[in-house]
């Protein structure tokens, strides 16, 4: 499982954990998030701007 990081605020979406507040269960892959996904912390609205955490 991977983590994706918002370039604006550092929010991390961890596929293993999901984001219950946003309605994404643990194990939800990044590719399964909707294309209009926005960062819950800063509202950056471009999913493709998130970077894969190493």
Image: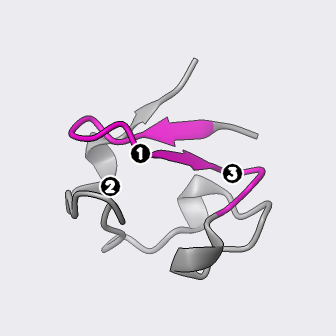
Mark 3 to mark 1: distance in Å?
A: 13 Å
Residue 42 location (% of width, % of height):
23, 57
* Residue placed under numbered mark 1 in the picture: 11
Residue sticking out furthest to the bottom: 23
From the image, give the main secondary structure of the stretch colored magenta.
loop
Image check: 34 left or right of 26?
left
Check disc 2: other Cα within 10 Å, few if <14, some if 14-19, many if 20+.
some
| Residue 14 among magenta residues | yes
Q: Give the side of residue 36 with respect to residue 30, left or right.
A: left
Q: Quadrant of residue 49?
A: top left
Asked which quadrant contains residue 27, the reply is bottom right
Assign the C terminus to one quadrant of the image. Answer: top right
Judging by the rendered image, the residue that carries numbered circle 2 is 47
The circle drawn on residue 15 is 3
Camera-side mark, 3 or 1: 1
Asked whether the beta carbons under mark 3 and mark 2 sit within 8 Å of each other, the answer is no
Horizontal and vertical percent for residue 28?
71, 64
At label 3, counting other C-alpha atoms closer than 10 Å, the crowd grade (few under 14, some 14-19, many 20 or more) is some
Instruction: Tell me what residue is drawn at x 78 percent, y 64 percent.
Output: 26
Distance of mark 1 from mark 2, alpha carbons?
12 Å
């Amino acid at each position: 499982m991977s983590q994706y990081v918002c370039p604006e605020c550092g929010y991390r979406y961890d596929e293993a954990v999901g984001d219950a507040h946003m309605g994404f269960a643990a194990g939800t892959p990044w590719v399964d998030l909707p294309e209009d996904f926005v960062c819950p912390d800063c509202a950056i609205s471009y999913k493709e701007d998130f970077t894969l955490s190493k």
